Image (spheres, rainbow, N blue to C red):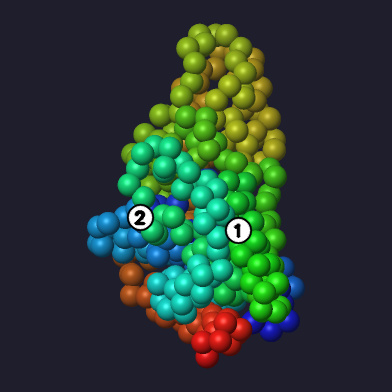
Amino acid sequence: MTNSKKVALTGIKPTGIPHLGNFFGAIAPALEATQKQDEQGIYFVANLHALTSTIEPALLKKHTYEVAATWLALGLNPEETIFFRQSDILELTAIYWILCCETQQGLLDRAHAYKAAKDKGQMINAGVYTYPVLMAADILAFHASVVPIGEDQKQHVEYARDIAQRFNHTYGSVLTIPEPRISQEVAVVVGTDGRKMSKSYQNTIPIFASDATLKKAVFSIQTDSTPLESPKDPNANSIYKLYQLLTQKEQAQTLHQKISTGHFGWGDAKKELLAATIAKFKEQRLLFESLMNNTEEIEKIFAFGALRAQKIARQTLQALQSARGIA
């Protein structure tokens, strides 16, 4: 464990440049938590989870660097926060297997991601099916007390709780029972089509994409054909909802008035959202680009974080092994 502080843990799967949903749903709350004097932040790039969906090695490596560079550019301090690449902590896969042997099939059958893949008729490998157990291993290995997440990830924390409680009931108080931390204002960040912003829906707005890609994403937001001169409902699509997250209250109120008064088209609103997105991350984008051009620095940060994370995970693994009679 990490001294007497409670642990706040979260991770992001590397499947491309993180988007606004990642930022408001996970990254921003996680970075805010690092300011709490009574908490130790432990954050990671969940590249083992990406093996279920990314088969191209070079692409996975690139995405891993993109996620790391995003965290660092947005303000994560690797001296204060334990920050690592998931695959560097071999203890996690050993913990995962022990937890698999304590997890019932019925629990995994009810997992949202598995059920969605099954309903779509997708090919399902063991990694997809046991995905929640690896996520539980991530959480439980570091004795996380709180897990900053979006509303859609709540089930994963509930699974970690269920698995930990079952293990503790059988073998003694070995694992810490985690709690989800969900910011209700951004519990679900809407995408360009009005659904939850998700790479799987292809409705995201990437934070550090090129200007052209960012513009294409913003202008792909689905809107109705209300005439330019007519008043419009600011909540009729994703534009105003995203603008509220990116700007101060006064700015959001001004856009709300423009949209609802009329003589202001959805195209005009998209331009304002694009400008707000660029302005929000202007300085951070420069740092992101610098890091992506110097991946050796990212590797050094990963190595430093792995040493710190491995020490904690090894202690947890040893406790689990002892409890299960394999050490």
Residue at image point 68% right, 67% down: 165
Q: Is 150 situated above or below 272?
A: below
Residue 122: which quarter of the image? top left
Secondary structure of the residue carrying tag 1 is helix
Q: Quadrant of residue 178?
A: bottom right
Q: Could you tell whether 33 is left or right of 47 in the image? A: right
Would residue 72 be visible to someone looking at this image? no
Q: Residues within 10 Å of mark 1 (few under 14, many from 20)?
A: some
Residue farthest toward the bottom in the current orientation of the protein: 327
Q: Which residue is mark 1?
A: 159
79, 261: nearer the viewer: 79
**Horizontal and vertical percent position of residue 16:** 37, 52
- Mark 2: secondary structure: loop
Q: Is residue 251 left or right of residue 55?
A: right
Q: Which mark is residue 125?
A: 2
Decide: few, some or many residues near mark 2? Use Cα within 10 Å; few <14, some 14-19, many ≥20. Answer: few
Q: Position of residue 254 (x, y in %)?
A: 65, 28
